[in-house]
Amino acid sequence: MITYRNAVAADARDVMKFWSVAAEDSHRPPDSTEAVLRLIDRDPEALILALDDDQVVGSIIVGWDGWRCHLYRLAVAPTHRREGIGRSLVTLAEERFASYGGTRADAMVLDDNTQAHRTWSTAGYTRQQEWSRWVKPL
């Protein structure tokens, strides 16, 4: 049975192992256990996990800056895809945004990640053509 909860510091290494097989990571600076720990320390509700027993099988980062709602790192283990875990994670994130008073959520999705496009489209999200993301590694 799949359960959902906020990540805690003890989950950081397992999250990194999970992301190494379930999340695309070639277009960004590498993630680290330290970065996951900083996220959890700064906002203990930001990282939601899906667990099958004690194994991480899904994740989503719920970013709220007090103004806008942002979603990152939606990932589901290849062994658990097409079971509704991704949709459940998005729903939990949206419920959290609603509790903050958020009115619109955006998701960062790579252009070439077509499997993710289907997931986000099914969840009711659409690509916003008139915007481009500008980035600068720090």
Image (cartoon, rainbow, N blue to C red):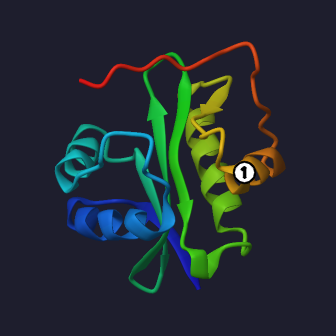
Q: What residue type is labelled 1?
A: Thr
Residue lying at 25% horizontally and 37% vertically, measured from the top left: 42
Q: Which of 45 and 85 is in front in this view?
A: 85
| For residue 8, above or below residue 111 | below
Where residue 6 appears, x then y in whole percent? 40, 58
Q: Residues within 10 Å of mark 1 (few under 14, many from 20)?
A: few
Q: Residue furthest toward the left?
A: 34
Residue lying at 46% horizontally and 34% vertically, measured from the top left: 63
Where residue 19 appears, x then y in whole percent? 41, 62
Q: In this view, does 70 lie to the left or right of 34?
A: right
Residue lying at 65% horizontally and 38% vertically, measured from the top left: 111
Which element carries disc 1, helix, strand or loop? helix
Quarter holding the C terminus is top left
Q: Quadrant of residue 14?
A: bottom left
The residue where tag 1 is placed is 114
| For residue 68, above or below residue 80 | above
Residue lying at 40% horizontally and 44% vertically, measured from the top left: 46
Quarter holding the N terminus is bottom right
State the count of labels. Answer: 1
| For residue 76, above or below residue 46 | below
Q: Is residue 114 left or right of residue 95?
A: right
Where residue 65 appears, x then y in whole percent? 43, 22
Where residue 33 appears, x then y in whole percent? 21, 56
